Amino acid sequence: MTEANGQDIRAGIGETRPGTGFDPKMLEVLVCPLTHGPLEYDAAVQELISPRAGLAFPIRNGIPIMLVDEARPLE
């Protein structure tokens, strides 16, 4: 969202990781859709990890894809 002067009015709400668009503060509200447990952010591969479920959910263009069918199993 922008104001009339073109400034981003969301600036400062959360800090995104440069180049990813993902805001790590989202981990405060996101949970695993399978276990409802906490998630961990792996910035190197852009995934949200659910240790309990043994799944890694991809983050695409800064958007976490929280679908079990889209997750990859952890080794």
Image: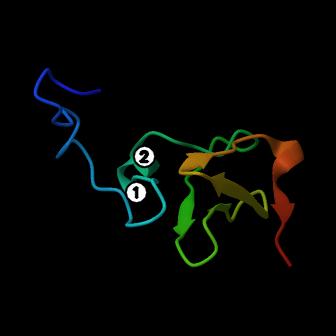
The residue that appears at 57% across and 56% down in the rendered structure is: 39
**Image position of 35 (left or right of 20):** right
Crowd tier of the residue under label 2, counting other residues whose Cα lies within 10 Å: few below 14, some 14–19, many 20 or above: few
CB under 8 Å between callouts 2 and 1?
yes
- The residue most toward the top is 4
Q: Which residue is mark 2?
A: 26
Spot occupied by residue 73 in the image (x, y as percentages of width and height): 87, 65
* Quadrant housing the C terminus: bottom right
The image quarter in which residue 8 lies: top left
Residue 40: numbered disc? none
Secondary structure beneath dot 2 equals helix
Q: Secondary structure at mark 1?
A: helix
Residue marked by disc 1: 24
Query: Does residue 13 appear left or right of residue 29 in this picture?
Result: left
Q: Residue furthest front?
A: 5
Q: Position of residue 9 (x, y in %)?
A: 18, 32
Relative to 54, is 48 on the left or the right?
left
Quarter of image, res 74: bottom right
When the figure is inspected, residue 38 is found, relative to residue 44, above or below; the finding is: above
Q: Position of residue 60 (x, y in %)?
A: 65, 52
Q: As rendered, which of 46 and 53 lies closer to the eye?
A: 46
Residue 47 placement: quadrant: bottom right
Give the CA distance from mark 2 to mark 1.
5 Å
Amino acid beneath label 1 = Pro
Residue at 23%, 36% in the rendered image = 10
